[in-house]
Image (cartoon, grey):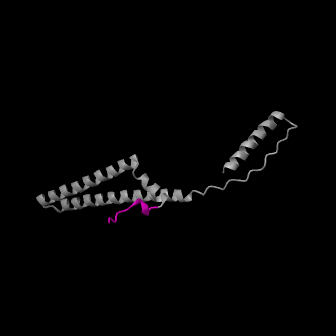
Amino acid sequence: MSKGLSTATFTGAERGALRRLVRPGWIALHLVALVGFVALVGLGRWQWQRAVELGRVQNYSYALEWWLFAAFAVFLWLKTMADTLEEATEADDEQPAPAPPAAVAPVVVDDEDDPELAAYNRHLAALHARHRAEQ
């Protein structure tokens, strides 16, 4: 059995946060990070080959520098993703639970003032009673 990550191991808030990382903007960022990492590692290899050819210490240090840049790019990419996931789960955790429905005061219909208003209020009261009976 595979021991990979499954969405069953994440809470709803975490799944929502992970979905953020596959949005179009994030996919573009993932691609930029991947291309940047490959380019930096490639530059480091090229510089290492130059160092072997020329035998200069300076070229060796440049090669190591390119690889450090690649490692730093990966660190920044992972840190950005972690911060985004943390912000998303905190935002989901901070949302208050929905308030229970408030008690509705009974409707008092006064026919003496306005018969048209009284008829409309009776109609609303009947709708309200039907709605409560359905729940």
**In terms of depth relative to the viewer, which is nearer, 113 or 77?**
113
Residue drawn at (19%, 61%) of the image: 60
State whether residue 106 is above or below residue 76.
Answer: above
Left or right: residue 103 versus residue 6 is right
The extreme right residue here reads 112
Residue drawn at (85%, 41%) of the image: 110
Left or right: residue 72 versus residue 97 is left
User: For residue 8, which quarter of the picture?
Assistant: bottom left
In the image, residue 83 lies in the stretch drawn in magenta: no
The extreme left residue here reads 53
In the image, residue 5 lies in the stretch drawn in magenta: yes
- Quadrant (top left, top right, bottom left, bottom right) of the N terminus: bottom left
Please name the predominant secondary structure of the magenta segment in the image. loop
Residue drawn at (18%, 55%) of the image: 46
Q: Position of residue 67 (x, y in %)?
A: 26, 60
Left or right: residue 64 versus residue 23 is left
Residue drawn at (43%, 63%) of the image: 9
**In terms of depth relative to the viewer, which is nearer, 32 or 132?**
132
Q: Position of residue 85 (x, y in %)?
A: 45, 58
**In terms of depth relative to the viewer, which is nearer, 33 or 66?**
33
Q: Position of residue 84 (x, y in %)?
A: 44, 56
Left or right: residue 128 versus residue 37 is right
Q: Which residues are magenta?
A: 1-10
Q: Position of residue 107 (x, y in %)?
A: 79, 46
